Every structure is written in structure tokens, then in C-alpha cells.
Image (cartoon, rainbow, N blue to C red):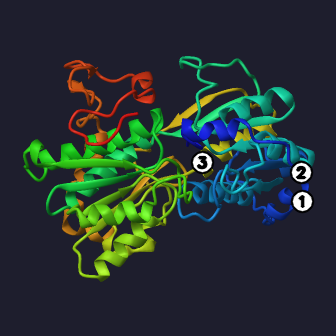
Amino acid sequence: MPLVDRSLSLTHRFWHVAALSLLVGACSSPTPTASPSASGSPTAQASGKELTVGMVIVGPKDDGGWNQAQYEGMQAVVKNVPGVKFDYVDKVNPADRPNVKGTQVADELIGKGAKFVIFNSDDFKDDALETAKKHPDVTVVHASGDYAWKEGKNFKNQPNLSNIMGRMEYGKMMAGCAAVLGTQNGKIGYLGPLINDETRRYVSAAYLGAKYCWENYLKKKPADLKFKVTWIGFWFNIPGVTLDPTKVVNDYFNGGYDVVMSGIDTPEAATETKKAAAAGKKVKFVHYDLKTGCDLAPEVCLGVPYYNWSLPYTDAVKKAIDGKFTSEFVWLGPDWKDINDPATSMIGFLPGKALGANKQYMDTFIKGMGDKSIDLYKGPIKYQDGKTEFLKAGATATDQQIWYMPQLLAGMEGSSK
């Protein structure tokens, strides 16, 4: 997940030295009592090994979205893998900690005993690389990013650095379908964070899912679907810097949109939809990131695509404990046999109450993606300029084409840059 767009990145690049010892200690989590591992692989307890995992978290650990999902994922690792301890610092961003760099936080966590450090935001990519180089005996994992991807554009040969990410494109396709199945007028607003390759591919995937379900299940004309993204400029509200997501959501509703999809970390889409519905508006929302997201406003929630971070983090931690960790680019999708199985699926989707009887179409859509009878990454598809081809007729997108998305797609409204 990106930390900040390039307009904010300059601030990030010139953060100054700060004393973090007290900060790290104050933000450290308690270590739950470890329970036996369900895996047949050697455990830390059996081998007499212990491992302290430190996490550098961009936002609040209880944000109701990305950061909470990451935090809870590591809590699950501690419970399931004996010998693992967990330490963290959250709110590591230019607004909450303007004098603190990700590398400094990592240094303090390592100084306290962490031998495994997770950076949980895309713009921490240089912090992750710098930390890996500075501490070659420490395992460094970067959530998102592509430095460990040998086939990617930005490969760095750093043996103690891995990237881990979920193929949320499929979750976003489900979310887009849910949005269409919940709209009465075909006007869907997307609450976007900042603009980069990742966010372009996510909102584009949501549009592809919406378009497919609009045409194939509701039998509507493509031209009658209005899909707009408004970017606020960061993953959550920074007063005076970003657009206010509360205002963006209400602007959508006041402008006639009846479904808002969230693409940010915090729950403004849920809270404002709940208020608008209570005021008599027939509106709904789609949450993002966190499995329990619909609980914020269950009656008006159409569903939530979410990450299951405990799955890849458990695997990486066990490899580190067993001395088997190697640099990897891990990009995990849904387990199509059961997308909501926490033991096997990195990406899931929980339908909300507001989906109602239209859940049957969602089930059909998910089944079709799973058995490959539905492939939304098959051409012809054009980019937003209407001229440049994303995919030629009959062509199927490669991982690189999906990951490095330079524009939104034709039919979408909103900025690509």
C-alpha cells in the first residue's frame, strides 16, 4: 500500500533525525501467550528459537482498514506460531510524526531485539531497502513494493528483503460487482486515496467488475453506467493537505450517486452512508481492507473485499525461524475453492446485508472468476484516453501489465495522474 503520493513524498524524503526509544516503547504491543502451531513444520518452541517481529505501520493500528488488517494479521501469527513476539510503531507518516523516518523506527525496533521487520506501506519501499542493506542479519518484509520481483521493473538483488502483497484486483472486481448490484440509478462513486500504479489498477479492477455485472446480470447498457473516482491525496484525511473524505462522500450523495466504494484506509464511506441513510437517502457503500468492515453500518453495506495478512506473514515468519527465508516476491490471490477460508485464501469477500437477493449474482460472478469462465483481464480493453490499448482483442494481461497500470480505463471518470 502506498504511503504517500509524490506531492507528499518530498516531505517524507527530508524527515529529520528524531529520538524514538520512548516512542517505540510506548507503542509496543503486549505479547499474547503463544499457542501450538497447527503446521507440521518445526516450531520455534520445539527448536528452542524465538523471534521478535517489528512492524512499521503507516496509520493507526485500529483504523478500521488497511493498518488494522495488518496489525490483526500479526496478532494471529503470534497466537499460532510459538516463540514469536511482536513489537510495532503505528502512525508513521508525515502528519502524525513529521520528524520520523521509517528507517529510524526500524533501527529502534531492531535495537530492542527485532530480527524480522515489516514495513506496511508502499512508499516505505526505500526505507525497507535501506534497512535491509544496513542490517543484513535482519529479515525485512515490505508489504507491496516490487524490489524483490526479478521480473519487475525495479528489481534490487537484496537477499534479506521480500515483498508480500495480495491480488486485491480480484477483490476489487467483486466489490465493483456488488456496487452495481446495489445501485438504483447506475451512479457509483469511488473514494480514492492517492494516485499511483497500485491505486489505478485497483479502481480499474473495480470498474471492470462493475461493468461486467451491469451488462451481464442487470442487462443494462454500458453507457448508462457512471463510475467516478475522486482522489483525496493520501490513504486517510490530513487536514489542510488532503481532500476531506467526509465531504467527498457527501458530495457524491448530494450529486445523485447512490453507492460509494471505499479505497482509503479509514471508514468515512461507512459512517457517512449510515448518516445519509438515517436521513432518508437510499444509499449504500462498499467497504475495503478489513473483514469486519460491514459491521460499521451493516444495513447499508453491500460487502467488503479484504486481506488475510496472517496467511503470508505466518509463512514468512516460519521460514525465518527455520532458517529457510529467501528473498521472494509474493503476490497471493483468492483460494477459489473457498475465498473466505483463512487458512488458504489471502483475498476474501464478504457480502453485506444490503446486497439482498442479488447475492445470487455475486455468487455466480465469483464462481465464474474461479473457474476462469469469466476473465476480466482479456482484451480488447482501452485506456482512459480511448486510443491507447491496455489489451488487444483476445490478449490476456500479464502480471506486469496489471501491476504497472499507467492510466485508468476507458469509461471511467476521474484523473489518471
Q: Nearer the viewer, residue 70 or 16?
A: 16
Q: In which quarter of the image is the C terminus?
A: top left
Direction front: furthest residue: 240
Would you call the spot at circle 2 few (<14 residues within 10 Å), some (14-19), or many (20 or more)? few
Mark 1, residue position: 22
Inter-mark Cα distance, 2 to 3: 34 Å
Mark 1 or mark 3: whose residue is earlier in sequence: 1
**Count of number-bearing discs:** 3
Q: Which mark is residue 111?
A: none
Q: In which quarter of the image is residue 283?
A: bottom left
188 with respect to 63 (left or right): left
Answer yes or no: do the residues labelled 2 and 1 have beta carbons within 8 Å? yes
Mark 2, residue position: 19
Q: Which of 176 and 130 is in front in this view?
A: 130
Q: Can residue 136 be seen in this view?
A: no
Q: Quadrant of residue 302?
A: bottom left
Residue at point 68% right, 54% down?
Answer: 74
The amino acid at mark 1 is Leu
Q: Quadrant of the N terminus?
A: top right
Q: Which of 364 and 4 is in front in this view?
A: 4
